[in-house]
Image (cartoon, grey):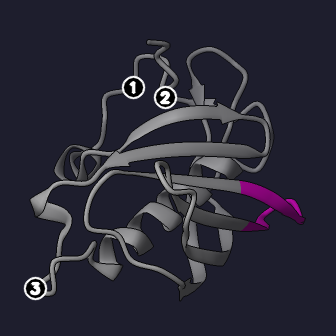
Amino acid sequence: MTDLLKGESPSGYQELLGYRLSRWEEGSAEMELPVDDRHLNRAGVVHGGVLTSLLDTVSGFAATFCPHEGRVRRVVTLSLATSFLGQSRNGTLVATARLRGGGRKIVGVAAEIRHRETGALLATSEGMFKYRPGSENREGMER
């Protein structure tokens, strides 16, 4: 398996939820999350907070690809409008995002989550993200 984070350790939140980055390139990203009991709400379906976390995280990755070894880019979320369109109790969730445009410091990203096995669309989002100082340029900053 390719180390898409290029040696960067997974975040505590990544370890808590159990998602993994499966594709990351200029302007887009994809993550996968195998659903288990910790992701379910009292009704036995994936909690909306889990879906929102995936949408936010994959969007951040889509905005921060850095092709330069040993360098990174970071963003903070300014806004995230989310729509919940379906439910899941099991299987694997696939979150994808793509950079839609913006300026030097603030960019827009669209994302969606589909159920891998059925293809059902579960949630979508539109978000605005601000580059952290040093991340505005494609070259990023030292880790």
Mark 1, other Cα within 10 Å: few <14 / some 14–19 / many ≥20: few
Q: Position of residue 127 (x, y in %)?
A: 66, 76
Residue 100 is situated, as x and y percent measured from the top left of the image, at 85, 63
Residue neighbourhood size for the residue with mark 3, other residues' Cα within 10 Å, grouped as few (<14), some (14–19), many (≥20): few
Instruction: Name the residue: 61% across, 59% down.
Output: 59
Q: CA distance from mark 2 to mark 3?
A: 40 Å
Magenta-drawn stretch, dominant element (helix, strand or loop): strand
Residue placed under numbered mark 3 in the picture: 42
- Quarter of the image that includes the N terminus: top left
Q: Which mark is residue 8?
A: 1
Q: Is residue 123 magenta?
A: no
Sequence order check, earlier mark of 2 and 3 = 3
Magenta highlight range? 98-109
Q: Is residue 105 magenta?
A: yes
Q: Nearer the viewer, mark 1 or mark 2?
A: 1
The residue that mark 2 highlights is 143
Q: Earlier in the sequence, mark 1 or mark 3?
A: 1
Which image quadrant is residue 89 in?
Answer: bottom left
Q: Position of residue 118 (x, y in %)?
A: 50, 56
Q: Write the residue at 51% across / 32% down.
A: 22
Q: Secondary structure at mark 1?
A: loop
Q: Secondary structure at mark 3?
A: loop
Out of 69 and 51, give the one closest to the viewer.
Answer: 51
Would you call the spot at circle 2 few (<14 residues within 10 Å), some (14-19), or many (20 or more)? few
Does dot 2 land on a helix, a strand or a loop? loop
Using the rendered image of the protein, determine whether residue 134 is visible from the camera's viewpoint: no
Say what amino acid the circle numbered 2 marks.
Arg
Q: Of the residues tagged 1 and 3, which is closer to the observer?
A: 3
